[in-house]
Amino acid sequence: MSDQRETHDSTDDGLDLARRDFLKGIGATATVAGSASVLGDDLLGMDGLEVVDDPIGSYPYRDWEDLYREEWDWDSKARSTHSVNCTGSCSWEVYVRNGQVWRESQAGDYPQFDESLPDPNPRGCQKGACYSDYVNADHRVLHPLRSVGERGNGQWEQISWDEALTEIAEEVVDTVVDEEYDAISGFTPIPAMSPVSFAGGSRLVNLLGGVSHSFYDWYSDLPPGQPITWGTQTDNAESADWYNADYLMAWGSNVNVTRIPDAKYFLEAAYEGTKRVGVFTDYSQTAIHCDEWLSPEPGTDTALAMGMARTIVDEGLYDESHLKEQTDMPLLVREDTGKFLRADEVEGLSIDADRPEYVFVMLDASGELRAAPGSLGERDGQHDHSKSIELDFDPQLAAETDVATTDGSVAVRTVWNNLRDELSTYTPEHVQEVTGVGRETHQEIAREFATVDRAKIIHGKGVNDWYHNDLGNRAIQLLVTLTGNLGRQGTGLDHYVGQEKIWTFKGWQQLSFPTGNVRGVPTTLWTYYHAGIMDNTDEETAARIRESVDKGWMPLYPSEREDGSRPDPRLMFVWRGNYFNQAKGNVAVEEELWPKLDLVVDINFRMDSTALYSDIVLPTASHYEKYDLSMTDMHTFVHPFTPAVEPLGESKTDWQIFRELAAKIQEVAAERGVEPVQDRKFDREIDLQSVHDDYVRDWLDDEPGGLAEDRAAAEFILDHSEESNPEGTDEQITFDDIDEQPRRFLASGDHWTSPIEEGEAYTPWKDYVQEKNPWPTFTGRQQYYIDHDWFLDLGEELPTHKDAPVLQEKSEYPLGYNTPHSRWSIHSTWRDSTKMLRLQRGEPTVYLNPQDAADRGIEDGDTVRVYNDLSEVEVQAKIYPSGEPGTARHFFSWEKFQYPDRENFNSLVPMYMKPTQLVQYPEDTGEHLHFFPNYWGPTGVNSDVRVEVEKVADGPGGDDGGAGGGGDS
């Protein structure tokens, strides 16, 4: 060592001098720390090593430290978030220097409301951490643009704001004057992610008499089994409640990929002994962290759940008291018609109800017929908490008898007996044959689930993408119902897909739809009809669609006129979303629907697929350039957007854009002398000469100009929502409060099913399970038997496994086609982010099982063609050993312009509609199931599709491009 030191000291190299000083610093540090480490002792024992009292203060090479400090310095800081269609709602701090956003960090100051749960901080993901790249990106839309030539050709001319607004206003005025105001469509998703921006366009569309589109069902996110069974659009526990469970099943919900800010609750629950089970077709990024992994064949989740339910029933592991009080299982069903036995059909039955035909019947322990308390016939509408489902008698769960009715003697049996008959099909052998899951495996999981104190299912979109998604939802829900795992902390079925539910509902609703009269339309039906798919669907489905529309069960706009004609849609606004990219059957959308639209206006901060196929693109502010609110059902906090910088270029906020458009419409209408137009459906006039004044007026306080600015709109929402300004208390959450720190909501509005309780994670269904209020269903109970004629005709009165209709023959297209959500984007946002692309392959990719690839002569990295009878796409192949054989997995959301031929992942997907999702129930009044945007309506279908994959030829001189041919292209 001595020779080495002498050699080192003899050099005059500046780097070596620095290294000597560095060693001095290490020695001093070890001394100050009192370290007895080998490193410290050895260094201090070296001859000639000088100990420096203040190594940092005397360190001569400081320039690099100053540069580093300056790089991380900032001029100002603002609180904001990322307004994307995800469940994150994460609060971030945005740093500004020299007038530009250049970095962001997780705020980390959510208050902890329960010390027994993991700290809610921090929240964030890798997408949000690079949002500043979008703010200053080259592909920001900076000026109003008008398409030149054919839509989608990528040719644009820059125009002024006045030109753009005038052109749009002229089209709006023409449309309203022609009394085709219901040919004006507004499409924007998920209000919870930025309700002010949502309301910006919806408010104007509402004033114009236009149509607001659904989105939750269109994206195939809505789980239709929940309104069918529970009478409520998705209600979930906040993710912190996962930690309270003794048993967690992630069923089709890849939480480590699609719920990154919340995955810690799933992972850390293991520290408390919680068992975690994953149900995924592939060995997913969440499955690797589970104690057990079940891999059913794609599309067989219903059969697996029914097999598990049979085990629970056959082995007596069900919660009998829960089933008797909380469900329809004791209700009697007529064997002749398949309908519930109604009180008005039984003479002498004691009831106190205005509508006895809507009162259901049970058999008590002594064999006497009893009216089921809480039936719809006793209640004043769907939500009536003045009644109770609490029982003062003991109903029979398993009963069969004959009843004297007004029609004579009728054989009846309970729903429970009908369910047991249905479950008898799902023997362990049959379940294994259908699903591929072992006979003992699914039974053991069912036993474990049924015997712990608190079991929970995290249910994901993976089940919703199928044609029979409603049956899948109902079967999986049955597991928590049978075991009584509802209405307590650590229990339930939590379904998270998008920010499906907004906490501050009332304030948002009044801001978005000031007239109180809303033309809402299910986007799946609207697209299906206007894209001409009705002409190509099977006869039975087409007939049921027409019947649903004719009966008014499902609205369709523009409405049918007195002469039987129905105009085409004329004008479409899209903002905060990417309708064209998410369109199932997008070949038909492009070829049939799009040509019908006279004008497509996209309001966007970047050029996405919808913008590419629009006529006018208006530049909107990014998420760091505006005021708004952010919330999610994954947590019970609210926090804001605040503008860290001014909008880039000529961009404006969504609220400002629609406000200025309203002003231009009013100006054009005044110049033309346009008179008010009587709305054909609602008792109101559409007055274009006051539309701007009405837009900025606070209708509740009748304050002119009170809502001219974005921040005022945000404050309006907080002021008029029970969650942030509850009645009967002085507590209130203001915008200044949430700018300082995220705040937990003070109460839950009446569209939630439990209160927000101090020191407890929000968990749904307490209003029904603990408080005994009637469930908002026809029977007033969790309802697994649906006696609607269509359900009976189709054999779906109870959950049951059915094979889906698939257009492609397996012999010709042997691979199933699946489009799951990706780790690297939120829908299409971030799909074009350079940083995100560098973390993957940088281009659209299809994932293939090694055997499927080998059978086709495909190697990792090859360019392949994925095709079926609808279209084809050219992508890169990735060998995916974790994927099941027989499936081509092509991740969702790549933009059309990222493919060489401008097709995309949805070009291979047809548009299906399932008739059972078009019903009203009860058929004549619809209190249980009725169309309401994003609550009940036909869902999109992504996964009942088959494809083939082949390698692309080298090109000139290559082979024919068939399987096994050619090299990389």
Image (cartoon, rainbow, N blue to C red):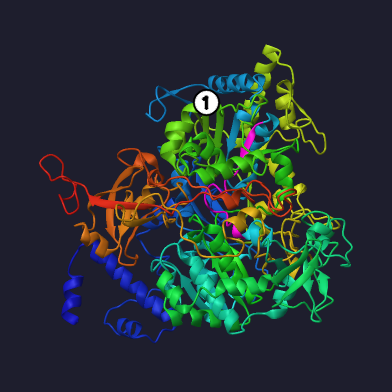
Nearer to the camera, 352 or 616: 352
| Residue in the picture at 84% in, 64% down | 387
In the rendered image, residue 638, in percent from the top left (x then y), is placed at: 66, 55
Q: Which residue is mark 1?
A: 599
Residue at 57 percent of width and 54 percent of height: 222
Up the image or down, 334 lies above or below 443; here it is: above
Q: Residue furthest front?
A: 408
User: Vertical placement of 623 versus 461: above or below?
Assistant: above
The answer to whether residue 229 is left or right of residue 826 is right
Asked whether residue 822 appears in the rendered view, the answer is yes
- Is the residue 316 above or below the residue 801 in the image? below
> Is residue 221 highlighted in magenta?
yes
**Range shown magenta:** 210-225
Residue at figure coordinates x 23%, y 54% from the top left: 861
> Farthest residue in the left direction?
957
816 up-or-down from 584: above or below: below
Identify residue type, mark 1.
Leu
Residue 72 pos. (x, y %): 46, 53
Give whichever of 265, 277 is nearer the camera: 277
Asked if residue 270 lies in the magenta stretch, the reply is no
Relative to 305, is 227 on the left or the right? right
Quadrant assignment, res 727: bottom right
Residue at the spot 68% in from the left edge and 35% down from the top edge: 203
